[in-house]
Image (tube, helix red, strand yellow):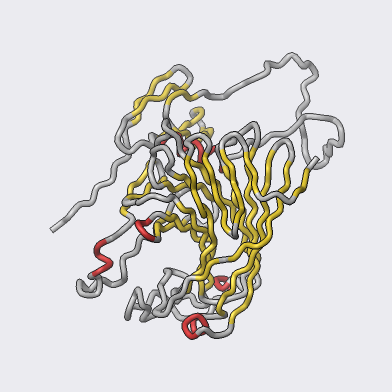
Amino acid sequence: MNNMNTKNQIENSHYLIEFKDGHIHLFDKVNQANYPNILSVIDDGDEGDSYDYSEPLDNKEIVAKFLGCEIVENTLKSTMKLTGTIDLPIDLGSRANDGETVQQEVTLEIVLNHHILEESISVDIRTVNIADEHRLRLVFNTHKKNEKSYADIQFGTIERPTYLPQVERWKEEHWDEKPRTIEPLLSYVTNGFHACDVQIVTEAVREYQFIGEEYAQIAMTVYRSVPYLGKSDLQDRPGRESGTKVGTEGTRHMNELIQARYYLRVLGNVDDEYSCAQFAKEMLTPLIGYQAASFRNNTDEFVLSIADERNLPLTHSLVEVEGEAVCSTIKKDSHGTIIRLYNPKRSDATKAIVNDKTVELKTCQFEDLLID
């Protein structure tokens, strides 16, 4: 049974999470590391269109205020439910001139598992959008200087700088638009592969940016509310039009329920690209199965095969893969079963054993080529 109480913290064997003075604090028991204000919800203006974000000239960041905390616990998990509000300007004009605002509710649900997957912290965010021309982001605080970011891509891991020096001179050098470090991810992003680094996994908007002093914060885009398909003469893209300037209700998300889930993990001493890729796959690829039982069996909709003789083996595997390789695809064709593996490591080759057959996997490398 669930046990509801009024305390302000949850914990398992890996973490202790506390809500205190309006902030969320994390203590990692394995690394004995503190992460004050680990998580926040931040909103800023967005004068862009459905193609690109563009920072408005008079931008203001607004932080959500969480006031209520409810703890629900059972033998399988502990949940912290936070309720709060964020005072949003109704549009860019109101943001620049301290004009009319609306109070938008935001809820966070933070879950710690017991017994299994205790290294994973689940974070759910829910809100109903009631403002225009803005961007809402979930911000994770790594509490360290970050010069590089790392994210998974198709069949590999990519390293990117958190700061681009071109941003200081892009107009003088006649760039078409301002270079930005708003980057895509496939399933996860991390600030490194060492103990106390932070990994974030999501299937929501696959977009991140390292922000703040020393780029210590990882900002994950929850949603953008923009009223036009295309615009011209933006602050970040002056002159050039990206598309026809027509109103698009779908990109405004007005009065729409926005909900997204993220998984947070603090890395240990033995983590690397492989363990991060495997963790992301485990979070985003849940086990699917059914129980072959006659009780309430709807045979009109589902046909379940129940063996007459129950002398089947306890386990059965189509294929077994050993080694530090990630399995991305298993499918049948006319010749047999196709298994696709890749090496997520950036610098080390690896080997994998597939049903007693050894395969060697090199790294997936990318190079910038200067062509005169």
The count of marks equals 0
Q: Residue furthest front?
A: 21
Front one among 223 and 240: 223
**121 versus 169 height, above or below:** above
249 lies left or right of 190: right
Residue 189 percent across, percent down from the top left: 44, 48
Front one among 127 and 316: 127
Is residue 127 at all visible to an observer of this figure?
Answer: no
Q: Residue furthest left?
A: 372
Residue 323 percent across, percent down from the top left: 43, 25
**169 versus 359 height, above or below:** below
Front one among 239 and 304: 239
Front one among 231 and 34: 34
78 lies left or right of 185: right
**278 versus 246 height, above or below:** above
Query: Residue at horizontal 51%, vertical 29%?
Result: 337
Query: Residue at horizontal 59%, vertical 36%?
Result: 118
Query: Residue at horizontal 80%, vertical 19%?
Result: 308
